[in-house]
Amino acid sequence: MMSRSFLRLAMAGVLAGAGLVLAIGPAQAGNKPAKPAKTVPVRLLSLNDFHGNLEPPTGSSGRMVDETGATVEAGGAAFAATHLKQLSDKNTLKVAQGDLIGASPLISAAYHDEPAVEFLGKVGVTASAVGNHEFDEGYAELKRIMNGGCHPVDGCSPAGEWKGAKFSYIGANVIFKRPERDAEKQALEALGGSNSSSLRNLLKGYGIPALPPVAIRWMNGVPIGFIGLVTQTTPNIVTSEGIKNLEFIDEVKAANVASKLLQIVGVKAQVVLVHEGDQVTAGQSPDACSAQPGAGNRIATQVDAEIDMILSGHSHQAYLCKVADPKGATRLYSQGGSFGRVITKVDFQVDVKTRDVVRSSVVADNQVVTRTVTPDPDIAQFVKDWKDDVASVADRPIGKITADINSGLSDKESPLGDLIADGQLAATKTGGNAQIALMNPGGVRAPLTYASSALEGDGVVTYGEAFTVQPFNNLMQVVTLTGAQLKTVLEQQFVGGPNAQAFTKILQPSSNFTYTYSASAPWGSKVSDMKIDGVAVTDTQTIRVAANNFLVGGGDAFLAFKDGTDLWSGPLDIDAFAAHFAANPSITPPVPNRITVVP
């Protein structure tokens, strides 16, 4: 519970207890004028969706359209470090918008992303919103990443005991799950005998945060408040067990509470770091604004007018937009791509008297992290050390392919998705008695390329490459569904149903399972002609269905999976994938013809 000295601590800048902490850093090294200036400069440099990409990402993930319209090679920790140094001045604060870890290449994922978090600390990141992928291994693991300690199962990494992140992870809309009246009662009781009706009213109905909601950093004698937010859809896109005691509330509601809290402690310059964003027109300049209004835009336009700018993430797009706040004033809404390929630079002035941002002074620029600069030698060595540690695992050949096997888009069947499903079925027949397998498209993170990526040779697939395809270490499971329940699962691929699917997500089927769907049919009547081994599926028959534990737990809004019975758990998904290569030493890309689409 929060301490009874809540009000005194709040006015000093700290809300102690139950995770509710204002993470306040020391004054930065920027010049403090001998005589007070009318305004002082501040520069923000931000990253989002780094996903542990210490090495330069490859393929399309390693390219970016620059300001001239040219497509250039981009990303890589050593190159990002050089760019950050070149862009930094004495007025700079470095921040991030989540998904810094999770769905990471093996070089970082093998050590539970400690290497990626250490890198971000080395380059000076001071605060970051949590993203949904920060919860991939659950809340307890996120707290370990934040605070330090060796992994409870795998132990310490080659670097020794983990010391914890050097920056603050913040998430104002992540609260502990409990009856609302109990949370409200605890929050109000924590105020003790104080007469602060403003604080009491502020916390009423809000709950007990599981993470620090805000971070305060000082620059040139003025405080800058950062509010962390993560997409409220997080429970649909991470494994449910790890967050079973958490609730992800509306981002706007939480941001407004956090903004008021900052105002109470005298912080007027306010920046939202939010892990939610929108899509853009393909191929646009990173400095353009063609963001299609969606979940990110809703947050950017509706959060409290006291908030001066919104730096976003999650959608892996690059854009710089100006939006109107609830009072009609203009403010920045931006995002910087993904995988360390873009750094968003924001310059602005803060009025030293009002301590508020002068919005007319805000200038933003998305800087592409090109590889034409000299890589930072210290970070290059840091990355090499981790690569050497993991090399014996990553470079091990597991099989061969005869051509590229593409991953495709989430709304279509793909050769790689089909291949993964085939491997999952093979791995779960014995023990789990699986009859079919289904793979979520969002779990297929990269293609397999025929061309050699290093010295392994053309067509050779290494464990590291396979891990890049499936980096989540999900557990394979099998449940029993009726034919009618299986049809509901497939209906839940599409928008318009009670499961509130955000966009079409086509589950990738094993080769022995076929069906037809009509894109134009109403929800509930889209799927037909389901067959297993060529035999029609009836509503009443029972079917053993293999899927990863993310799907079985209702992830990606496939809630009907939770109706499954007779749960069986088997190997990790990556182990099933590797075993499939071992059993089939030379694999030809499957033809994606298991799903028939009716116009």
Image: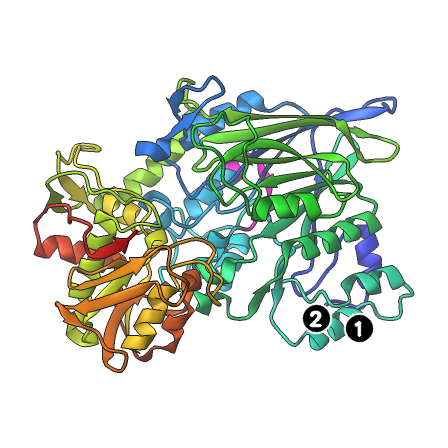
Q: Which residue is mark 2?
A: 1
Would you say 129 lies left or right of 496 here?
right
Residue beneath the point at 33% across and 33% down: 60
Mark 2 lies on a secondary structure that is loop
Whether 236 is among the magenta residues is no
Observer able to see residue 90: yes
Please determine whether, in this image, residue 536 is positioned above or below residue 577: below
Would you say 242 lies left or right of 21 here?
left
Residue beneath the point at 82% across and 25% down: 39
What is the spatial separation of the Cα atoms under label 1 and label 2, in whole angstroms? Answer: 9 Å
First to last magenta residue range = 121-130
Please determine whether, in this image, residue 533 is positioned above or below residue 285: below
Q: Quadrant of the N terminus?
A: bottom right
Q: Which residue is mark 1?
A: 189
Q: For residue 308, what is the image quadrant?
A: top right
Residue beneath the point at 12% across and 34% down: 457
Foreground residue, 320 or 324? 324
